[in-house]
Amino acid sequence: MDEHRTRRRTGAALAGLLAADGLVHLYWATGATWPAPDERALSLAVLGTEVPFGPPVVLPLAALTLTAGAGVLAHGYGRGGRVSRAVAGAVAAGLAVRGLAGLGWAAGLLPSPPGSPFRTLNLALYTPACLGFGWAAARLARAR
């Protein structure tokens, strides 16, 4: 497969992940808590601790992930120059940090509440996705 097509596909995949994350945060900003029954359960499942999921918290996160998605998509298509490349690098760094923290939780080095779904979700979904997409974002950020 040629280099440009791989770059476009990587940018599109990363942008899709970030857009989905941003849209979920927008959904939570409405006060909805799917897939959890309430805000406390949502917080424990997503973060492993209790934090508010109200608009002042989730709207900036939605804006950040949606903007980052636009940046990596632009870089995937060879647009945006240094700015989109820096966005791709920042996404790679952020995902790598989250992936490494996930390994810390999995190893028991970081606390997580006993009996919450966070441990299972972290092992099965969050950490592998962050490490895999972080690696892809790093490769994309290196592309000129």
Image (tube, rainbow, N blue to C red):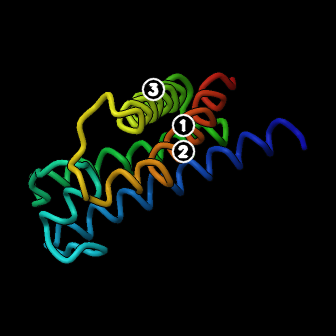
> Residue 111: x, y in percent?
23, 36
Q: Say whether marks 2 and 3 touch (CB < 8 Å).
A: no
Give the residue drawn at x 27%, y 75%: 34
Q: Which residue is mark 3?
A: 93
Residue 33 at what x, y percent from top left?
Answer: 21, 72
- The disc at residue 131 is 1
Q: Is residue 92 left or right of residue 140?
A: left
Q: Quadrant of the C terminus?
A: top right
Mark 3 neighbour density, 10 Å: few (under 14) some (14–19) many (20 or more): some
- Name above or below for residue 52 compared with residue 97: below
Which residue is pictured at 50% across the width and 26% down the height? 89
How would you rate the neighbour count of disc 1 (Cα within 10 Å): few for under 14, some for 14-19, many for 20 or more? many
40, above or below 31, in the image: above
Label 3: state its secondary structure. helix
What residue does disc 2 label? 128
Upstream in sequence: badge 2 or badge 3: 3
Eye-nearest disc, 2 or 3: 2
41 with respect to 46 (left or right): left
**Does residue 20 sit above or below 139 in this rendering?**
below
Callout 2–callout 1 Cβ contact below 8 Å: yes
**CA separation, marks 3 and 1?**
10 Å
Q: Amino acid at mark 2?
A: Pro
Could you tell me if the residues under marks 3 and 1 are in contact, i.e. CB atoms within 8 Å? no
